[in-house]
Amino acid sequence: MLAISRNILILFSAGLLLLLVGCGVSTEDIEATVQARIASIPTPTPQIVILEVVVTATPIPEPTVAQGNVYEWDDISLEFNNNAIVANNKYLNQTISIRGEVDSIDYRDEWLFTDDFSNMEKEIPTVALEATNTYRVLKCGLENIDEVENLSVGDTVIVNGKIGEWIGNWLTVYPCSIVD
């Protein structure tokens, strides 16, 4: 037998009496509250987002020409990095001015610049410019050691000289001079 009043639920079963005291809310009230709360939750509206992705190749920049035919070493080194054969054909034996940052100031064997192996002990004062975007180095073989007197690693300089052949990861310029 089941008897229900507003706040008390009494169950009679097999001689057992259970008395439950309610909180003043019937199960119908709880169910109505749950249904109302569920109904108040906003339903997200599906949205379709279409993204167009365009993949393009990064073009190889042409060397930047600054103040009267001064090329940037970073640009030329990218050309050699991307296709050394084409770049070598383009610059070989050309006399040009190139701007870059000094990476080292030291001596290099003369044969590196001249392919003359008859005097393996002769060295040439050399200023090396290292590219910031590749591991390529320009080696400027100087005719006059006095040109490095006020020069330090990290200085930005403009060198002028005859472009030699591309060798591995470096480009030789000889004879070469510091023009700025």
Image (cartoon, rainbow, N blue to C red):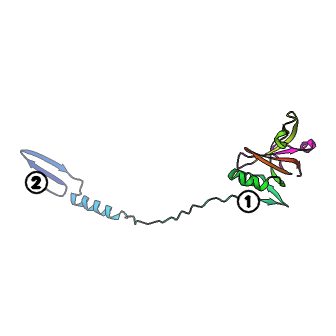
Confirm whether residue 60 shows in the render.
yes
Q: Is residue 146 left or right of residue 114?
A: right
Q: How many marks?
A: 2
Between residues 53 and 116, which one lies in front from this camera angle? 116
Find the distance from the CA under tag 1 to the CA under tag 2. 94 Å
Please give the name of the residue rendered at 52% of the width and 65% of the height, measured from the top-left corner.
52
Looking at the image, is 122 positioned above or below residue 44? Answer: above
Q: Amino acid at mark 1?
A: Glu
Q: Position of residue 72 (x, y in %)?
A: 78, 55
Q: Position of residue 160 (x, y in %)?
A: 86, 52
In this view, the residue farthest toward the top is 121
Between residues 104 and 2, which one lies in front from this camera angle? 104
In this view, the residue farthest toward the left is 14
For the record, the magenta segment spans 131-156
Residue identified by numbered label 1: 62
Looking at the image, is 128 positioned above or below residue 180? Answer: above
Say whether residue 154 is magenta: yes
Q: Is residue 144 left or right of residue 97?
A: right
Q: Position of residue 167 (x, y in %)?
A: 75, 44
Looking at the image, is 3 positioned above or below residue 48? Answer: above
Between residues 141 and 103, which one lies in front from this camera angle? 141
Say whether residue 89 is magenta: no
Q: Earlier in the sequence, mark 1 or mark 2?
A: 2
Q: Are marks 1 and 2 in contact (CB under 8 Å)?
A: no
Give SS at disc 2. Answer: strand
Q: Position of residue 32 (x, y in %)?
A: 26, 62
Q: Amino acid at mark 2?
A: Leu
Looking at the image, is 15 positioned above or below residue 67? Answer: above
Q: Is residue 119 left or right of residue 58?
A: right
Residue identified by numbered label 2: 2
